[in-house]
Image (cartoon, helix red, strand yellow):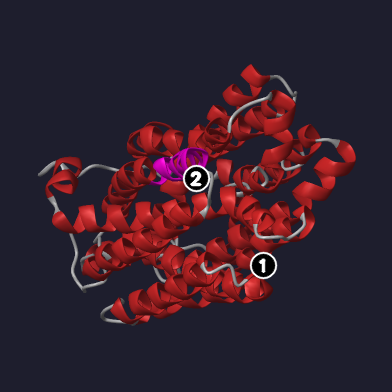
Amino acid sequence: MDGQQMNQNIKKTPSNRSLIYFIIATFLFATTLRTPITVVGPIISFIRDELGITNALAGFLTTIPLLAFAIMSPFAPRIARKFGMEWTLFYSLILLCVGIIMRSVGETILLVGGTMLIGIAIAFGNVLIPSYFKWKFPMHIGLLTAVYSVSMNISSGLAAGFSYPIAANAGWQIALGFTVILGIITLIFWLPFLREKKIALHMPTSQTKKTQMWKSPLAWAVAGAMGLQSFLFYSSSAWLPEIFISQGLDATTAGWMVSVMQFAQIPITFIIPIIAGKLVSQRPIVIFFTVCYLISFTGIFMEWTSLSILWMIFLGFGGGASFGLSLMLFSLRTETAYDAAELSGFAQSVGYFVAAVGPVLLGYVHDLTGSWSTPLLLFIVISVLLFFTSYMSAKNRTI
């Protein structure tokens, strides 16, 4: 970013009071981006048994939002250029609430349709929020990314932990539907931003950035890192409760294991974006989360179930570090807010196609082999692949 543009961004930066309000709004917005998905894993057996579907189809309920992320992410920047970031994000919240209500009716068609709407809505938040930080608060990207990441982990962890007890006592429809409360609260807090000057993402006239993204090895590396860490997150959230149940844990405890993972991410996801913004190269972070992933999945594979909490803590550390770094890469590897939005859209489109394979693939492999051993080996293999893509992305350079 050149000096003139930096000065323009600094002039646009709101007061500290506005920053504090925006931090609160960011925290709330982030709660809507994972909870509708993480509630599914612990209660997938309720949904599967009542609707009479296979494990592969049940896993597809987690995959549908990922496919929506992949398909819609490239369109988010151009839609934001037309309507403005604030209004685009506001409309996405409305769509999210509609999708949650549809999914909670209890009919198979509405379950699938509502899940599609949820995925489309979340895609806009995934792509636009990081570039919104870069445009509006260029001096606070690390802090805002940290708050954003921590909020997703806290809310998704609580949702994963409470969804099974709610489903057992009130039905899986209620367990899927209670997250609409977060969407409504966020809508209310987002209203003041609609009165502000429209923030649009203007495309440079000299060259087409989208084409450059497809041609850039660095952009592909960032996309690979985004996709593989998402593969690990969504696949583990969907199937680890079932895996732990097969290893002897009761259903409630197995559901809370996912919450342990989410809570373990909280300090890491807060610290990593701030550290990443200060490092010349982020490769030490890559080494750290790779070791955490390998320790965790190896322990689960060996069925050392008495240490399940320890494995989930390591998984939380690895997931928090890899996710926090992935979000920061959109800003660290670009010069402008437009570039950040384009890289975010490209990386999340490619990345979520990769991630979408996870839950269905692991469910299919389990159905095929009748065991969770092979899926757990796949977790280890993906962790190694994530190391290579992230290591390439962590070098200090821009697109």
Q: Can residue 96 be seen at all in this image of the molecule? A: yes
Q: Toward the viewer: 263 or 299? A: 299
Q: Toward the viewer: 32 or 110? A: 110
Looking at numbered disc 2 in the image, what kind of residue is underneath it?
Gly
Residue on which disc 1 sits: 260
From mark 2 to mark 1, how far is it between C-alphas? 25 Å
In the image, residue 357 lies in the stretch drawn in magenta: yes
Write the start and end of the magenta stretch as one range: 355-369
Q: Residue at image x 67%, y 25%?
A: 52
Find numbered disc 2 in the image and state the secondary structure of the residue it sits on: helix
Taking 190 as reference, is 96 above or below it?
above
Q: Residue at image x 88%, y 38%?
A: 170
Question: Where is residue 308 shown, x and y percent of the image?
Answer: 64, 71
In the picture, which quadrant includes the N terminus?
bottom left
Q: Residues within 10 Å of mark 1 (few under 14, many from 20)?
A: many
Label ID, residue 125: 2
Q: Residue at image x 20%, y 66%?
A: 2
